[in-house]
């Protein structure tokens, strides 16, 4: 069916714009929201890492649909401040966050694995069989 | 583009007055500090730092916190997007001389370092009961 193949025609343009911006911006990625993400991939899988210190793993909400990964959660403020304490610095952010990331291929939803250790969330997203490139033998 | 910034993924990079021997970026950990008459609490965000690679020192009234991040690079993969870099966390604070350095407690949990710096007994406020005159 034709419409199932439909993709946002501007998405490639936006991607190009980002790439050009990153050429001039050097290492700066200030447009990146919280949490900052790193994305890696090979032919078999994609790996997404995010630094979200001080979370309870159960409060991290990771969902995958097709090639779209969504990450939600809330960093709660600390309750360490007892009564009568003076606060000198508050730099650690708190509040809810939500980020979505498009993976370069469709993901095998049932096999996605997420691990949270030392404040780093690592999500392994295996590539869907159907989206893997197939070598076609050419008959001579 | 007009700003010259080396900040990656919202992490503040330290100015290079004293350079480290290792060629890894040095970040300033986001920190909360609270003080009560009995103690000072310091909480630092240091994700990807193992408790074995975290160091806390108190020397001549300067509290120094250092944490080496684990390398977060999966092998055999190509990097498609970099939102943050990993390196070393380092930060120093001046603290009052009232801290009893032998009683400092440090705990690392899910990338958050928590320090309790108790004050000397003599420095803690004492309540003196005023007795009524005869």
Image (cartoon, helix red, strand yellow):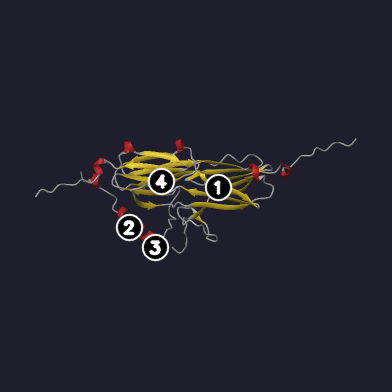
10 Å crowding of disc 4: few (<14), some (14-19), many (20+): many
Q: Quadrant of residue B121?
A: top right
How many angstroms separate mark 1 from mark 3 (CA)?
Answer: 37 Å
Q: Nearer the viewer, mark 2 or mark 3?
A: 3
Q: Are marks 1 and 2 on the same chain?
A: no
Q: Nearer the viewer, mark 1 or mark 3?
A: 1
- Furthest residue to the right? B134
Pointers 4 and 1 in contact (CB under 8 A)? no
Whichever of labels 3 and 4 marks the residue nearer the N terminus, that label is 3
Work out whether disc 3 and disc 4 sit on a shared chain. yes
In the displayed structure image, the side of residue A54 where residue B126 appears, left or right: right
**Left or right for A104, reference B46:** left
The quadrant of the image that shows the N terminus of chain A is: top left
Q: Chain of mark 3?
A: A
Measure how far apart labels 3 and 4 are at the Cα level: 25 Å
The chain ID associated with circle 2 is A
How packed mark 2 is, by other alpha carbons closer than 10 Å (few <14, some 14-19, many 20 or more), is few
Q: Are marks 1 and 3 on the same chain?
A: no
In the foreground, B133 or B48: B48
What residue does disc 2 label?
A16
The residue tagged 1 is B55
Query: Alpha-carbon distance for marks 1 and 2?
Result: 43 Å
Residue on which disc 3 sits: A24
Q: Which residue is mark 4?
A: A49
Dot 1, crowdedness within 10 Å: few (<14), some or many (≥20)? few
> For the residue carrying disc 3, how many other residues have a C-alpha within 10 Å: few (<14), some (14-19), or many (20+)?
few
């Amino acid at each position: 069916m034709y419409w199932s193949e439909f993709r946002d025609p501007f998405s490639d343009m936006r991607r190009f714009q980002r790439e050009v911006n990153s050429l001039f911006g050097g290492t700066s990625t200030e447009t990146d929201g919280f949490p900052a993400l790193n994305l890696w991939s090979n032919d078999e899988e994609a790996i997404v890492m995010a630094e979200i210190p001080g979370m309870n793993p159960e409060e991290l909400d990771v969902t995958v649909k097709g090639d779209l990964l969504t990450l939600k959660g809330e960093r709660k403020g600390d309750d360490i401040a007892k009564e009568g304490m003076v606060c000198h610095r508050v730099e650690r952010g708190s509040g809810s966050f939500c980020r979505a990331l498009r993976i370069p291929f469709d993901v095998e939803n049932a096999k996605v694995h997420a691990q949270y250790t030392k404040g780093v969330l690592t999500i392994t997203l295996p590539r869907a069989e159907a989206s893997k490139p197939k070598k076609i033998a050419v008959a001579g | 583009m007009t700003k010259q910034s080396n900040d990656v993924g919202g992490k503040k990079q330290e100015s290079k007055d004293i350079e480290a021997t290792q060629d890894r970026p040095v970040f300033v950990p986001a920190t909360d500090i609270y003080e009560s008459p009995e103690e000072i609490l310091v909480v630092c965000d240091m994700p990807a730092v193992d408790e074995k690679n975290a160091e806390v020192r108190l020397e001549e009234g300067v509290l120094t916190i250092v944490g080496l991040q684990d390398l977060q690079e999966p092998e055999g993969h190509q990097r498609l997007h970099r939102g943050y870099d990993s390196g070393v966390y380092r930060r120093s604070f001046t603290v009052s001389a009232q801290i009893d350095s032998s009683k400092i407690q440090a705990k690392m949990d899910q990338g958050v370092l928590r320090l309790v710096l108790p004050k000397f007994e003599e420095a803690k406020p004492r309540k003196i009961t005023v007795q009524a005159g005869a």
